[in-house]
């Protein structure tokens, strides 16, 4: 028997691929895909969706039929999986993820995956990986990351929601707490929950409403980012932690959302406009006054020049994360690396649409000395694949919302389960070192 004929033997083959429509955390429809293998494994993945989406993201397919889910139905994407993608993958080795993702990209045939839909492709790509892992009897993080998958991520927990994720609140989209002083992921989660509840009480006592936004953080009507940050520092102290040393702060300005005609409007729509240099000065001031370790989308998605200035000014001291700027896209990331824009990438699986392209983005970042932060979307599901992905890639950081709403806590709970499975002597929690500058290759 030749080596060729042996290839594939003993491997789990894809027997069926089935998609269906399910609800996400905003009550909008999204795609769920189940993959069955010849080893008897059946695993499902669900696709998230963003609200402050970047212009350069891969495009998920929505039906546009106003009579179903106000035009947001995903039956076309479901049909693409059941009628086109599934039949093309049946019989393939489920462990050949790179070949499968290439097939998905070719079947779609467009640069932004608008033809079959990035939601259709991603659901299949993730479900294949999940089914392959279960078929081989290994957890997903180990299947994807091998023996080096032992680093739990430091979470950036979004406790104050603004921008597009909460009505009438701050322009800045996310104010996050970062438990850099915790010893384990379980300690980090407990610390986050304690601060979250303390914040709720402080907001209530100050007469603010304590309803939560899309990512489970509070959404008080605060006048300025300064007010939000001062409140966070006070809350961290009140909860019994030292701001900066034990719990740091991270921001996602999501500034593309308040960028119009070449200027930024970081305060209120009727306040005065800022140019990029003024925005950089604003961040410089905030970083001097508050223990900020990370700023995401400080400038807009196509303001490459502004990003260079931001990086020159703050890049040695602060993590500068490109979300809408890089959209988990290797080509855009490579431009940023060449030009010195940012020093970290936010990694969202549905921005690019396949697992291997996501892994390539993380690898490209790490090789260039950029950090990678694995991230949820504002519209999520109970799917916890990103928790495994964070451990598999050794990214060291995750952004997955607040300590309320089960679409967010599912990710934290999965991380704690992974840590327990690895065991205390194996699981690493990098703490502050997750934010130390990587050496450039
Ligand atoms: C998670 C985010 O929000 P969305 O999913 O709405 O893009 C983000 O901007 O980082
Ligand atoms: Mg963002």
Image: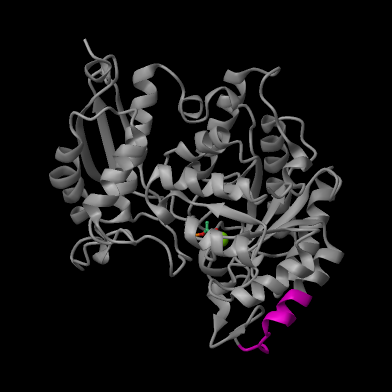
Image coordinates of residue 351 in percent, x first then y, are 43, 56
Image coordinates of residue 112 in percent, x first then y, are 34, 62
Q: Is residue 437 visible?
A: yes
Q: Is residue 22 visible?
A: no
Q: Quadrant of residue 318?
A: bottom right
Q: Residue at x 65, y 51 (%)?
A: 370
Residue 247 part of the magenta-drawn span? no
| Rendered position, 35 above or below 425 | below
Which residue occupies the foreground of this view, 38 or 376? 38
* Label total for image: 0
Left of 113 or right of it: where is 75? left
Image coordinates of residue 298 in percent, x first then y, are 65, 68
Left of 298 or right of it: where is 335? left
Q: Quadrant of ligand 2?
A: bottom right
Q: Which residues are magenta?
A: 270-281
| Rendered position, 9 above or below 391 | above
Residue 272 part of the magenta-drawn span? yes
């Amino acid at each position: 028997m030749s080596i060729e004929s042996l290839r594939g033997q003993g491997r789990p083959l894809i027997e069926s691929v089935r998609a269906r429509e399910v609800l996400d955390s905003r009550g909008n429809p999204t795609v769920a895909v189940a993959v069955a293998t010849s080893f008897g494994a059946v695993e499902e993945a669900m696709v998230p969706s963003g609200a402050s989406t970047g212009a350069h993201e891969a495009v998920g397919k929505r039906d546009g039929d106003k009579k179903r889910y106000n035009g947001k139905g995903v039956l076309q994407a479901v049909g693409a999986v059941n009628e086109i993608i599934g039949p093309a993958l049946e019989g393939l080795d489920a462990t050949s993820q790179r070949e499968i993702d290439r097939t998905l990209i070719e079947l779609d045939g467009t640069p932004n995956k608008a033809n079959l839909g990035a939601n259709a492709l991603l659901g299949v790509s993730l479900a294949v990986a999940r089914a392959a892992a279960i078929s081989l009897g290994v957890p997903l993080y180990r299947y994807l990351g091998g023996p080096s998958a032992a680093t739990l991520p430091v979470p950036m927990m979004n406790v104050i929601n603004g921008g597009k994720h909460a009505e009438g609140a701050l322009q800045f989209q996310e104010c996050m707490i970062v438990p850099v002083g915790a010893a384990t992921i379980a300690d980090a989660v407990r610390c986050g929950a304690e601060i979250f509840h303390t914040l709720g009480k402080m907001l209530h006592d100050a007469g603010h409403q304590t309803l939560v936004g899309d990512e489970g953080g509070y959404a008080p009507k605060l006048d300025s980012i300064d007010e939000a940050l001062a409140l966070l520092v006070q809350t961290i102290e009140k909860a019994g932690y030292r701001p900066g040393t034990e719990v740091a702060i991270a921001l996602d300005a999501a500034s593309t959302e308040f960028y119009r005609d070449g200027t930024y409007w970081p305060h209120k729509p009727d306040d005065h406009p800022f140019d990029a240099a003024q925005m950089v000065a604003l961040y410089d001031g905030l970083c001097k006054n508050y223990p900020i370790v990370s700023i995401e989308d400080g400038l807009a998605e196509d303001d490459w020049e502004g990003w260079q200035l931001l990086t020159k000014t703050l890049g040695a001291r602060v993590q500068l994360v490109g979300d809408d700027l890089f959209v988990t896209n290797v080509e855009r990331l490579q431009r940023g690396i060449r030009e010195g824009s940012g020093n970290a990438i936010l990694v969202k699986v549905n921005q690019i649409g396949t697992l291997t392209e996501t892994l390539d983005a993380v690898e490209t970042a790490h090789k260039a000395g950029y950090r990678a932060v694995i991230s949820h979307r504002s519209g999520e599901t109970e799917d916890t694949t990103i928790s495994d992905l964070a451990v598999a890639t050794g990214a060291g950081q995750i952004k997955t919302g607040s300590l309320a709403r089960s679409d967010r806590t599912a990710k934290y709970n999965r991380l704690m389960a992974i840590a327990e499975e690895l065991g205390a002597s194996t699981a690493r929690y990098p703490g502050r070192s997750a934010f130390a500058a990587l050496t450039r290759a």
